[in-house]
Structure formats: structure tokens, C-alpha cells
Amino acid sequence: MPESADLTPLYVVLVYLGALIGLGCFTSFLFRGTSNDYFLAGRSIGPVLLLMSVFGTTMTAFALVGSTGKAYELGAGVYGLMASSSAIVHSLVFFTIGIRLWAIGKRFDFSTQIQFFRARFQSVNLGFLLFPILVGLVIPYLLIGILGAGAVVRGVTQGMFPDTFAGTALPSGKVLFAGAVPPWVTGLVVCCVVLFYIFTGGLRAAAWANAFQTVVFMITGVIAFVLISDALGGASAASEQVLANTPDLVGRERIGKLQFLTYGLVPLSVGMFPHLFQHWLTARSAKSFRLTAVAHPIFIMIVWVPCILIGIWAAGMGMEAPGGNPNAILPKMVGSLLKDPYLTGLLTAGILAAIMSSLDSQFVCLGTMFTHDIVLQIRGKDSFTDRQKLWMGRSFIVAIVAVTYGLSLLQPPKIFDLAVWCFSGFASLFPLVCAAVYWRRATKAGAYASILVMITSWTYLFYRGLIEPAMNGIELEGDYLVGGMMPVTLIFAASALALILVSLLTNPPPKDHVDSFMIPRTR
Amino acid sequence: MSTPARIAWGVVVAAGVLHTDLWAWDDDTLVFGFIPWALAYHAGISILAAIAWALVVRFDWPGGIEEWADEGPGSDREGGTNA
């Protein structure tokens, strides 16, 4: 019988998951049992909890696992490409869009962004058009989390269960991840834990869990950085090794300049994430946004800088990505360089924290959208009791989780590329929300045109950039670019142009109606 | 818009412009002996962004927005009309 590896890291992770379940039980005491409390936490979230929950929601598996993998492939320039642009743009969106949507949402008692768009553009059908698009774009986002969790736990638990899990046999005869917990088990456990605490406390539970998990993944990220640099003989020695072995990763030779410039549009996606919109609505007051807008760029720096360095250090020391998958680099660095099983377990829990802190908000928001934007819209909001509304939301969440979990079992390749496509879709809807909040002349027809052009151009480029190469067995080197630019550039421009042109060519909306959505600048 | 508010937004614009540092594309200097220039510079941009937003929040806060939000007609606007 083969000897199994130390199970301590797994026990630490299980203790962490148990703590989350305990947190779910705690927040259930705060839950008032109403649908408003479940979906919006009674609009009672203060500045610190808002900052932590918005940051935790925004930072997915992409931020930890994906950033390390991207740095391993493209070098230190990944921070400028993805993180510092987000530091500027995310806060811009929080300040210019988030605060206004909070105010409009509170004034008209909206629970979802679709309610806002329906009312602003005086069209119920606009919501029926937007709903499947938003859900379709959120599902890949959920997939990233479930697959990311699976990849991390598989990397850390190698050799723990040699008799139970045989691993993946390659054509060469080599076996990868022998004795490791397979992703389908991790995905199932993570989904069940998240479902438990959001079922017990709704969005308030998600906010508390986000805050707790944000603290965990920020602290463990810094610990990982310090310990890994120590294991490599110090940060200077590790970086000198990169300069000697892979000097192009210190500069930005592997990133195109146009790609760099146009990537700045991708972070605009935060303006249209349904789960973030819902978090904005939970704020106790507009003042709650102040801390979020200011501290968000610093928080991004604290999480991303260590991950980028770990990614280039891995490349510099010649570490091979397991199965050729760069996203497995972080767990491999943790597993191979940190010999303390407690620390390995803690760091694994930290990565899972980042992943689950995004999943929970997304789950709740999908339930809210389905309940408010589809069922109550069709049947009328007085057709159901408050309790029935709660259970409708929960049922839809379970259905979506089941679909996403099923998709995760197919182990789709290039999952982080899929994430960028999903962000690009949301970012290309940004002109819509921007016009809805600021442009009086934006019309219903313009809104329809913008959404239809966005989804058409997105689908075309998505097919050309991801589906077609996959069908033909072509492995793309790096991101799919159009004329050196990120595809989001074209989709965004087409969507904005359609909105502007069609709005100008159609009758303006009634002045009184639009005025009711425009916030006076100074009162 | 007041002068401090203009300056605050000027710092935001400056952070955006400075983000496009195409002039130091291939610089392989290690700042403090371990942080690649491309990373250190953009970490600095993150700090500048935080300062910029602190200034905007301080000097260009949308006054009266909470009172405006509280004056609303409530949920009777939900849904709009059919297209």
C-alpha cells in the first residue's frame, strides 16, 4: 500500500470551512426573515463592511491564482495591465456610478439593476432581454471560482489519498495529481458551504463572510509572499534569478502596447456586475462609499504585488506548470516551497477564501434577479408571500449552482481566458449604465440597440477568438487580439456608438420622467 | 466646481495618463533590489489613485445625495411600462 502524504493541510482547510459554517449560523441570528433583509441586508451595511465585501466580491480566483499564472507567462507588466488600471477605474466607477445607483435604488426602492433599467427606459421587455445576457455572463464567472478552487486543492493534496484517487494519466504514461482530492469533490464542498451560509443569512451573511474572507486572503497572501521569498533565499535573490534566466519577464516584452492601452476598458465591467450592483444597494448611506473608493486601490496593490512576484519567481527558477497550466503555479509554489503543513493549509484556505467571497454574492444576486425581475414581474409582486419569494430565490440559486457545477465537471480549458471574455461583455454594457445615469437624451430604442449590438459583436468575436480555434484544435499564444487591441475595444465602441446614434435618431424620453432619475449636482 | 475639486480630478486624470508609461516598456531595473520597475511604477500608480480618490471624496462629494434618495416615491415606480 503506497504511503499517503500528511493530511494536516486538508484538516486546516476543513477547519476553515467549518468556521464559515459557524459564521453562517451567527448571521442567521441577525437575519430578520424578510425578503428585503435576505436580498438587500435591509440596506444597513456600513463603510468597513461595504469596503470588505465589495473588494472580496471583486477579487476572484482570477486575482490570486490567475494573476500568478499570468505573471508566470507574461511577466511583471501584468500588474500594470490588470491591477493598476483596475485601481483607477474601479474607484472611478464606484464614485461616478455606484453612489448614484445607490441613491436612485434607494429613492425608487430597487433591488436589482434590471429594475433600474426597466424604470429608467420605461420598458419591461428591456429586462427580459438583459436577464439572460447577465446570467449568461455571470455563469463563466462562477465557473472560474469552482474550477479555481478545484485546481488549488488538487495541487495541495497530491499524494494524500493514493488508494482512493488515482490521478490523471497522461499519454506518456506519467500520472498527474496522483492521490489528490479531485476538482469535482472540492467544487461540491465549496458550493455546499457557500449555499449553507447564504441560505441562512442572505446578502448579510455574504457581506460578513466576504469581510472575514477578505481579511483571511489578504493576510495569508502576504504570509505566502514572505515565506516563499525566504524559501528562495530572499526577494532579491529570487528576482535576480528571474533577471538571469527569464529577463523578458522583468520588463514587458511579452505584452503588446496596444493590448496594454486597451485593456484599461476591461475594469469598467464593475459598473455592470449584477452582484456588485446589489452590494451598492446594501449600503447604509452614500457616505459608506467613501472608504471603498479610497482604499480599494491600496487593497488591490496588497493582493496583486505579491502574486505577480511569486509568478515571475516561479518562471525564474524554472518551475514547470503542472499539466502546462500556468494557473496551477501558485498552489505548486505553496506546496513545493513551504514545508510547514499548517501554513500550507492556511494559505490554501486563504485562496479558497478569495474564491468563495465572490461566489456567495453572485449566488445571492442571481436568486434576487430571478425572483424580482422574472417571476414577480410576470406574476405580480403581490402574488406571493414574503416566504415564497425567499424560497423562489433560493431555488433558483440551487438550479444555477447545479448547472455551473455540471459545467465544471466538463473541465473547460482556458477558463481564465473565458473570464476576460465575461468581463469584456460586462464592460461593453458600461455605456448603457453610464448613459442611463448621466445622459438625459438616452432613449429606450438606444438602450435596445446598445444591448443588441453588444451581444452580437461579443458573440462574433467570442466565436472567432475562443470557439473556432478550439474546434480546429488551434492553441492560441496569449490573448486573442484584434489589430493588436483587446476585443473589448471594438465591442465597447460598437455598443456606445449604437446607443448614441439610435438615441439621437429617436424621440427623446419625457422630460419629467428623465428628470426624476437625474441627481442634482449640488443642493 | 471649486478649485480644490478641479485639482482633485486633475490628479485622477494624471494617474490615468501616467498609467500609460509606454516610455519605460523594456526597463529591467530592479527597484530596492527585487521589484521590477514595471511593477514598482504601477504600484506607485495604485497609491496615486488612492490619493486622487481621497481628494475627490474630500473636495467633490455630491452634496445632498442622501436627502435626494430619501425623498423618493418608493417602490411604486418598480417595473416601468411595457415596451
Image: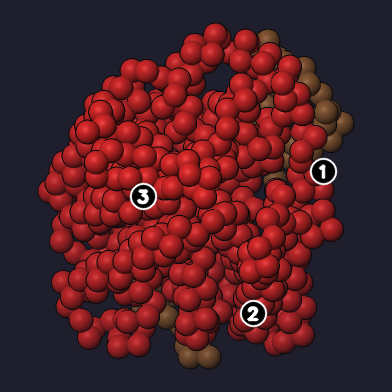
Chain colours: A red, B brown
Residue A391 falls left or right of residue A433: left
Q: Amino acid at mark 3?
A: Pro
- Counting residues from the start of the chain, the first of labels 2 and 3 encountered is 3
Label 2 chain ID: A
Q: Specify the subunit that label 3 lies on.
A: A
Q: Are marks 1 and 2 in contact (CB under 8 Å)?
A: no
**Label 1 sits on what residue type?**
Lys
Residues at marks 1 and 2 on the same chain = yes
At a point 56% along the width and 79% down the height, the residue shown is A121
Q: Nearer the viewer, mark 1 or mark 3?
A: 3
Which element type, helix, strand or loop, lies under badge 3?
A: helix
Question: Above or below — where is B24 with respect to A20?
Answer: above
Identify residue for label 1: A257
Residue A211 placement (x, y as % from top left): 34, 39
Asked which secondary structure carries label 1, the reply is helix
Of A516 and A106, the residue lying toward us = A106
